[in-house]
Image (tube, rainbow, N blue to C red):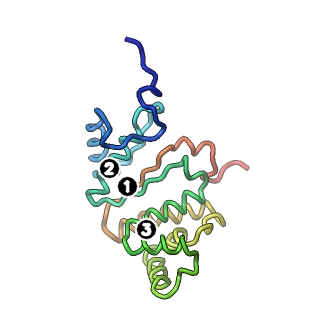
Amino acid sequence: MARVASRILFPTDEPLASDRMIGRGEDVEELVAQLHGGVHRILSAPRRTGKSTVCRAAVARLAREGTYTVSLSLFELTDAAALAEAMAQRTLASRGSLSRLIERVRAGGEAALKGAALTLSATATAELGDGVELALRPGLAARDPHASLLRALRMLETVAARDDRALVLYVDELQELAGNDYGPGEP
């Protein structure tokens, strides 16, 4: 039997929708069970073998079951500042009123922070830490990208603890860490 090239079998660079997945149900179940149990996982395999498809299906199922989920792709987020802002935005998006506030502020700029929105922003910052500002003030993370990334990571923990909910952080395309500026390195 001749080997079929993966680009023929999988004619897309995007992960498949979970309803188009074939034969990976057990992988999704196992990953969901591990994440429910608080086990951290790193999946590593050759390109185009279904890692992202399985992970996205597992994350979607966890979200449907009430777990907070934050999904990020390092193909899209090319430095620590972009990663920090996206992480903060997606973390707060799981909390209803804050999600709407983020959308309003990012669409209308800081001028949208008036009245009730300003009060909500101040309350959220007091409750969840200064990572909230990363979600509300585009460009803030660029001032100190590495400190901002740490603030966003701390906010993940704070949100999960305050709401007494499990939180899963899914970061796709980790190999991009080697080629971009996500952390302090050699000058």
Q: Is 74 situated above or below 117?
A: above
Mark 3: amino acid: Leu
Furthest-bottom residue in this view: 115
Q: Are marks 3 and 1 in contact (CB under 8 Å)?
A: no
Mark linked to residue 35: 2
Q: Nearer the viewer, residue 74 or 109?
A: 109
- State the residue position of label 1: 168
Front disc: 3 or 1: 3
Residue at horizontal 37 percent and vertical 57 percent from the top: 69
Q: Nearer the viewer, residue 83 or 112?
A: 112
Mark 2: amino acid: Leu
Q: Nearer the viewer, residue 94 or 153?
A: 94
Q: SS class of the residue under badge 2?
A: helix
Horizontally, residue 76 falls left or right of residue 166, namely right
Q: Nearer the viewer, residue 10 or 64?
A: 10
Sequence-earlier tag: 2 or 3 = 2
**Percent position of residue 108, x then y:** 55, 75
- State the residue position of label 3: 92
Mark 1: amino acid: Val
Per the model, the C-alpha gap separating discs 2 and 3 is 21 Å
**Percent position of residue 78, x then y:** 60, 51
**Percent position of residue 3, x then y:** 42, 16
Sequence-earlier tag: 1 or 2 = 2
How many other residues sit within 10 Å of disc 2, few (<14), some (14-19) or many (≥20)? Answer: some
Front disc: 2 or 3: 3
Horizontally, residue 141 falls left or right of residue 13, namely right
Residue at horizontal 45 percent and vertical 86 percent from the top: 116
Horizontally, residue 33 falls left or right of residue 187, namely left
Mark linked to residue 186: none
Quarter where residue 124 is shown: bottom left
